[in-house]
Image: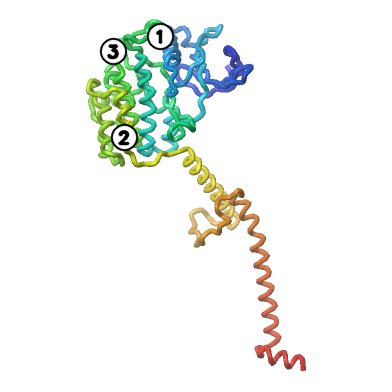
Amino acid sequence: MIGRFIGNYRVTRKIGEGGMGAVYEARHRTIRQRVAIKVLHAHYASERETRDRFCIEARAMSALSHPGVVNVFDYGQTDDGVAYIIMEYLEGESLHQRLRRVVGKLPVYSALHIGRQIATALVAAHCQGIVHRDLKPGNIFIVTEPEATCGERIKLLDFGLAKLMEGSALKDEVPEFQTCAGMVIGTPSYMSPEQALGLTCVDSKADVYSLGLLMYLMIAGRQAFTNGTDIEILKMQVQSKARPLREIGAAVPEEVEALVQVMLLKDPKLRPSMSQVKSRLDELLNQTEDEPTTLIDERRSASLCAIDGQCNEIAEARRKITKTPPGSPRPARHPAPWFFFPSRLSPTLVTARIRPRWRILGVATALVLVILSLVLGVMGGEPIHQFLTRSTG
């Protein structure tokens, strides 16, 4: 696939791969625009069900045209039958990668902010009669956008399991496809009870439940239902109640906990609509006292980590020189002088430039002491004024 042209775009590298397809980076042959191209694996090309879902995904994302949904530029098949979707190229990280990077959970404000953006995009989808049905951290992408709150915006990915509701304008534009009763579709850890049961009456309230599970994960740093096989987790989604956030030690306002709990109700009729969730998240964001986490804060943290890494390298080099075994007690440390704080020079260069000065000063001091000892030795302990008088006389 690398080096091949799909339309006017030349494939340059593979970005990632899943069970049904792969995503590649490509550039336009003339204007050099960078895009992402999602293609189906060749052995799925003859399966009508997979091709139909791929078509629904492309048409659903294209119809939404929302800043919270990845943009689609083209859809089609190559001469040899490879189905593809050409999308905007995104730079950033998935929510899954973000949670791994911060080791688990996010500040409450950040979780509410991301949840609100997801809800906003889903409101637009539900208004078009589109239910995502596969919300999970890997399908939420976070990109840099200076004009957005906190300097970031989320993008919903992968509408491959999307369902078109009755009345949707897209139903007449895409192949007819019906989910059979008993067919379980989605990711067990983020699946609604009605999906877990394989019901055909899945609607927008399924996305509300899944978003509640995502909110739980972001705030608590753990999934609501864990420690089991996929079948056991599906059973918990249907029968078990998620423990309240504050009960498991999450530092979260009572109002936030209450919203997540109502989103995770087993009966879809008792859950709020996605527009109600969005409105409530707006209210909670205005009440939350936490300061928003900006990209500047993250870059500052990254810089400090880099400086720490350089300092560790210096310490390791000194340990090798002095042959100090790992784990040995460190000598007492004195407050660092101003020139050891971050500057345009790396710590290595700073210490390299400072060392010669201390060496010269040490040599000069030693010379002075030697001269003084010689003089005192010649005097033999005689007072200096008597020594000088006797010497001149």
Q: Label 2 near label 1: C-beta < 8 Å?
A: no
Q: Residue at x 49, y 40 (%)?
A: 296
Disc 2: which residue: 284
At label 2, which amino acid type do we have? Leu
Residue 124, percent across and down? 37, 19
Instruction: Name the quadrant of the N terminus.
Output: top right
Residue 176, percent across and down? 37, 5
Residue 219, percent across and down? 34, 36
| Observer able to see residue 208 | no
- The disc, 1 or 2, on the residue closer to the chain's N-terminal end is 1
Q: For the residues marked 1 and 2, what is the alpha-carbon distance in whole angstroms?
A: 42 Å
- The disc, 3 or 1, on the residue closer to the chain's N-terminal end is 1
Residue reaching furthest right? 393
Mark 2 vs mark 3: in front = 2
Disc 1: which residue: 49
* Image disc number at residue 200: 3
Badge 1: residue crowd in 10 Å (few <14, some 14–19, many ≥20):
some
Q: For the residues marked 2 and 3, what is the alpha-carbon distance in whole angstroms?
A: 34 Å
* Image disc number at residue 176: none
Could you say which is closer to the camera, residue 275 or residue 249? Answer: 275
Q: For the residues marked 3 and 1, what is the alpha-carbon distance in whole angstroms?
A: 17 Å
